[in-house]
Amino acid sequence: MKILAYIPARSGSKGVKDKNIKPFKGLPLMAHTILNAMDAKLFDEVMVSTDSEVYRKIALEYGAKAPFLRSEENSSDTALTILGLLEALENYSQLNKRFDHVMILQPTSPLRDARDILKAWECYERNHFQSLASVHKIEINPFLLRTLKNDQLSSLMQVNSTIRRQDMPVFYQVNGAIYIAKVSELNEKTSLNDSVIGHEIEISHALDIDNLKDFDGYN
C-alpha cells in the first residue's frame, strides 16, 4: 500500500501575495505542512504541487518532492483542488509511480501536526471508508442565528423555542486541514466536502491562514 501526501501550493494568491511562502513562525508557511507530513513517517512520498519554480525550490529545501510543475490551467483562482491532484497522479503514472491512497494537506493549515495526521489516518483505516475530511466543532450554534430584514428577526432553522441550549445538536465544519481518499475512487466530479466520514481535530489546529491579520495574529 502506497500513500501520497499532496500539498497544493500555487503561487497566485490574490489576498496575500505569495501567501504559501510568506514567513509564519520563522518558516515559509508551506514548510510547516511539509515538515509535519514528514514527521508523521506515514507517506511514501510528500509532494508539493506548485506552478512556481521559486516555490518548488523551497519545497525541495524542506525535504518535499516536486517532480513536476502544475499546469497553468490548474493553477488559476478558479481551479479546483481535485483537478490539480488528478493531474499530479497522472504525471506520476507516467513515471510508473502509483499510489493507493492520497492525503491532501493544505499549506494554509500550519498548526495541524503529525499527530493529527496519524490520528486521521487511523480513523480512515479503521472505518474502511472511501474518504475522510477533518472537521471541528463550530463555536456558534446555527440554532441561535437569526437573519434581520426590515427590523424583523427570523430564525435560520426551524427549532422548538423551548429547547435548552445544552440539548441543541452539535454542529461541525469541514476545515480543509486534512482530506484522505482512495485514489481509485477519485474523478473530476469528486467533491472534497462530501466525504463519507469526518474526523474531529482541535479547533486550534484547524487554523486556516487566509489574510494578513491571520499572519499577524499568530506570528
Image: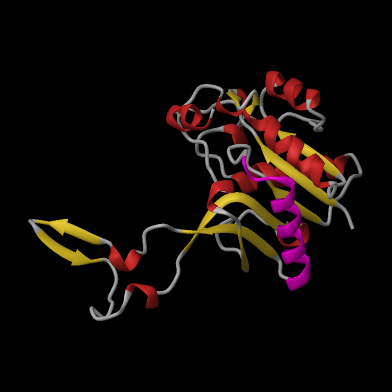
Region of the chain picked out in magenta, as a range: 111-128
Q: How is the image coloured?
A: secondary structure
Q: Is residue 187 above or below residue 157?
A: above
Quarter that holds the C terminus: top right
Task: Determine the main secondary structure of the stretch shown in magenta.
Answer: helix
Q: Is residue 180 left or right of residue 211?
A: right
Q: Is residue 37 left or right of residue 135?
A: right
Tell me what residue is drawn at x 41 percent, y 57 percent: 139
Q: Taking the image as drawn, is residue 3 in sight?
A: yes
**Quadrant of the rendered structure where residue 189 is?**
bottom right
Q: Is residue 127 highlighted in magenta?
A: yes
Question: In x, y percent, where is residue 124?
Answer: 73, 65
Tell me what residue is drawn at x 84 percent, y 47 percent: 43
**Quadrant of the rendered structure where residue 111 is?**
top right
Q: Is residue 211 left or right of residue 5?
A: left
Question: In x, y percent, where is residue 183?
Answer: 76, 57
Tell me what residue is drawn at x 92 percent, y 44 percent: 96
Farthest left residue in view: 150
Q: Is residue 39 above or below residue 211?
A: below
Q: Is residue 189 above or below residue 10?
A: below
Q: Is residue 129 left or right of residue 152?
A: right
Tell me what residue is drawn at x 69 percent, y 18 percent: 54
Q: Nearer the viewer, residue 27 or 2?
A: 27
**Quadrant of the rendered structure where residue 60 is?**
top right
Farthest top residue in view: 54
Q: Taking the image as drawn, is residue 70 in sight?
A: no
Question: In x, y percent, where is residue 176?
Answer: 58, 50
Quarter that holds the N terminus: bottom right
Q: Is residue 91 highlighted in magenta?
A: no
